[in-house]
Image (cartoon, rainbow, N blue to C red):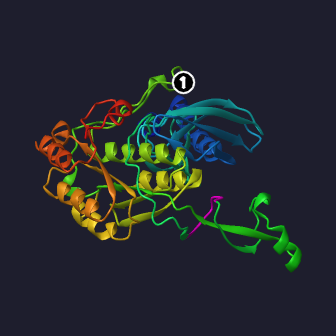
Amino acid sequence: MTVSLRVVLVLLALSLAALAVTGQSVFARLSYLWGLVVAASWLWSLLALRKMTVERRARTHRAEVGQIFEERFWIQNGGRLPRLWVAVQDHSNLPASQGSRVLTMIGGRQGRSYLARTRLVLRGVFPLGPTELSAADPLGLFPVSHTVSPENSLLVYPMMVDVRTFPSPAGLMPGGEAIRRRTHQVTPNAASVREYAPGDPLNRIHWASTARRDRLMVKEFELDPLAEVWIFVDASRTAQFALPHELPTQVADALWHPSAKVALPPSTEEYAVSIAASLARHFLGRGRAVGMVSWGQSFQILPPDRGSRQLGKMLEALALLRAEGELPLSALVTAQAEHLPRGSTAVVVTPSVDDDVPLAVDLLIRRGLRPVVVLLDAASFGGPEGTAAQVAAVRALGVPVCHVPQGVDLSASLCTLAV
């Protein structure tokens, strides 16, 4: 019961009491007035949200941290009566969401729309809703609301930086023969033919087989015998550190400064994910086959492949990755290193200060792989000292090392490796 309704009911009770004591007609009129106000307000609120609908439309449901997410809200009045005001409340857990508005004077059979722009500051998946419509009578005696469940969600990729020159070992050819692994990319190694499926490009049709079998046939390819790139992301819970940080509740520059930068949260988890995504885009842009290994919520391995489709798979996996793993880096490398082709480049991204980092690097070398290590400075994230000793130990093995402290420019830091 609202405060306004309590006041009106008290006035009604006082008018009835005064009428019973004095019998004067003025108190009778007041009693009728307050009773009429309560009845009219209840009827008004009963119709306030009748045939009112809300729809959320977004151009895309995938974006990157730092970008501006645009979403259009469409509120439709399907009834004949006008609506004085309607409040739209966006209850999505998307940080700094700007979807809530108050709309006034929506005519009968009319609609209103507005564009909400939100600066994306956190990776992950966020439902676009629920959305609540609220209204009331003019005196606010009987507020009403209606909640619409979310129909879509937004997948926010981790922030990526431009990596201009990330030195990587040349790698070794694994024998000079085609690797017996199917790929969506067109390579010089045509392996077989199969029936045409909707979506197959026309330039992959094998016309000789099509003529013989009297139906469309397309070529299948195998990977080139090139050295692969594997990215190991250390998602062990015990290796992570973070400084206190609060996400912004609103971003004022989302509309007027679309090129403004968003700082990464001071967390080793967020830095590791951003670095892995940036390196994946760097190598894929140069035509390399890239795979990924991590153990966060569960063991996850993405087989190496080329092209934008592989980048999408990796970004989706990294967007959902949480550093909740129980497996240390050395165990992760041991479990997967024996399955990697000799000569592959293994990029290890870790904030660990344990002695297992040099052991894992040494294991990669003995397996015939070419490791590159990206070490996050644990002390700068509120963790213990020891990263400098790790850098020296890895450099003693002749392996390139990139030392990344908190707050540094990732684009410049990833271009500086020490051997």
Residue 341 percent across, percent down from the top left: 41, 66
Q: Which residue of the protein is positioned furthest toward the front in this rendering?
A: 176
- Occupied quadrant, residue 106: top right
The amino acid type, in three-letter code, at marker 1 is Leu
Residue 363 percent across, percent down from the top left: 24, 63
Q: How many marks?
A: 1
Q: Is residue 375 magenta?
A: no
Magenta residues?
A: 181-187
Residue 266 percent across, percent down from the top left: 27, 37
The one nearer the camera, 303 or 76, is 303
Is 77 on the left-hand or right-hand side of 139? right
Residue 85 against residue 279 in the figure, above or below: above
Residue 37 percent across, percent down from the top left: 57, 36
Tell me the residue at 54%/55% (across/down): 310
- Badge 1 marks a residue whose secondary structure is loop
Tell me the residue at 63%/38% (across/down): 72
Q: Which residue of the protein is positioned furthest toward the top in this rendering?
A: 256
Specify whether residue 299 is in view: yes
The one nearer the camera, 289 or 134, is 289
Residue 179 against residue 316 in the figure, above or below: below
Is 291 on the left-hand or right-hand side of 198? left
Tell me the residue at 73%/75% (across/down): 194
Quadrant where the N terminus lies?
Answer: top left
Q: Is residue 182 magenta?
A: yes
The one nearer the camera, 193 or 1, is 193
Specify whether residue 142 is in view: no
Q: Which residue of the protein is positioned furthest toward the bottom in this rendering?
A: 213
Quadrant where the C terminus lies?
Answer: top left
Is 263 on the left-hand or right-hand side of 37? left
Is 363 on the left-hand or right-hand side of 354? right
Classify 10 Å Cα crowding around label 1: few (below 14), some (14-19), many (20 and above): few
Residue pointed to by mark 1: 255
